[in-house]
Structure formats: structure tokens, C-alpha cells
Image (cartoon, rainbow, N blue to C red):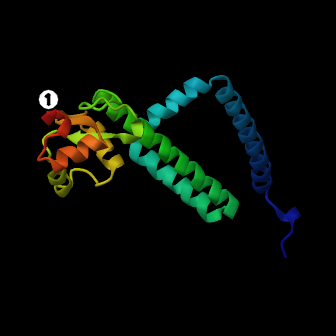
Amino acid sequence: MYNDNMKTPSQVVDVDNHSIDEQRRAKNREAAARYRERNRSKVNQRMRDWREANRDKARQMSREWRNRKIANGTPEEVAAIRAAEAEKTKRNQDRCRSEVFAAYGGYKCNCCGEEEKLFLSIDHVNNDGAAMRKAKLYSGNGTGFYLWLRKNKFPSGFQVLCMNCQIGKHKNGGVCPHQQKV
């Protein structure tokens, strides 16, 4: 039969050290939290640098965190996570689109001068968009195309056109009807 009185001195010390170690860890966590609070910008920059240097590991850790949260979360928590992800995706797509349009002259049609953002898109000057999609240089959607442009440092051969000019150019053998009138 075994009872607590039968512990050796080293076992008793181990139990005591365990509680001391736990107290020490708790104090360290509190001190680290205070440091992060006082030096928020420095800590954030250090984390950005680490994520940039360890991109694959950071993505894997983020994916694992998300999967744990989704697997163990309540339906409300899962819905909140998915809503936050959708919002972040939309922000990133909008930022990418803005960068692309800024690189190609801003939100103004190169042909007719239309400035309504919803009507504007990026045009392949040489009418080779279908060939580029078939070559699978980028995925077929707008965001995939914008990401490809940004990744390739905004190559020449593209311009901003409104959809009227895009379709007119397509139906008119590669020349916008506005340009034919001139």
C-alpha cells in the first residue's frame, strides 16, 4: 500500500519545485504581457519581421490555429471566425485592386475617361487575355489576375478601360468604337 507519507525527499522537493516553477511562469507571463502593452509597436514590428522571415511556418501555425478554433468552437464562434475571414479577404482584394489600378493610371478609362469604379477593369492591350488564361498564368477570376499583375510588378501591355470600351473593343476587332470616330 502506498500513501503520501512514503514519498522520498526528492519526490517531495519535485512537488514543491513544480509549484515554484508554476509561480515563476505565471510571473513571467504577467511581465511579458506588461512589456507587450508598453512596447506594442516594437513587438508588432518584430512579429511582422518574424512572419516575413518564416512565412511557411507562420502560415502553417495560422492554419492550425484556425482549424482548432473551428473544430472546438461553438456555432456562434465559428460564424464569427468565418465572418472575420470574409471581411479580411474583401479588404485584401480591395487593396490589391486599388494597387493595380494605381499602377495603371488610376480609376479612369484610358479611352473615354469614365471614372465610375464599378464600370472599370483592366484590359489586355494586345487582346491576348484568353491566351493568357489558357496558359494558366493566373486563375480566371479578377482577383487572381490582379494578384498576378502585382506579383509580376505590373508589367506593360495592360490598361484601364470601362466595360463599354472593353466590349466595344472586343466586338470591333480590337479597336474601341470611340477610337474609330477619331
Residue at 74% over, 38% down: 24
- Residue 76 lies, with reference to residue 159, above or below; the image says below
Which image quarter holds the N terminus? bottom right
How would you rate the neighbour count of disc 1 (Cα within 10 Å): few for under 14, some for 14-19, many for 20 or more? Answer: few
Q: Nearer the viewer, residue 91 or 116?
A: 116
Residue at 56% over, 54% down: 65
- Residue 9 lies, with reference to residue 111, above or below; the image says below
Q: Nearer the viewer, residue 69 or 138?
A: 138
Q: Is residue 176 left or right of residue 139?
A: left
Dot 1 lies on which element? loop
Q: Position of residue 70 (x, y in %)?
A: 60, 61
Reading the image, the residue beneath label 1 is 182
Q: Nearer the viewer, residue 115 or 24?
A: 115
- Residue 95 lies, with reference to residue 22, above or below; the image says above
| Whether residue 96 is visible | no
Residue 72's quadrant in the figure?
bottom right
Residue at 27% over, 37% down: 161
Q: Is residue 181 left or right of residue 143?
A: left
Q: Residue furthest front?
A: 181
Q: Position of residue 43 (x, y in %)?
A: 57, 28
Q: Position of residue 94 (x, y in %)?
A: 44, 39
Q: Amino acid at mark 1?
A: Val
Residue at 38% over, 38% down: 97
Residue 110's quadrant in the figure?
top left
| Whether residue 121 is visible | yes
Q: Is residue 6 left or right of residue 119?
A: right
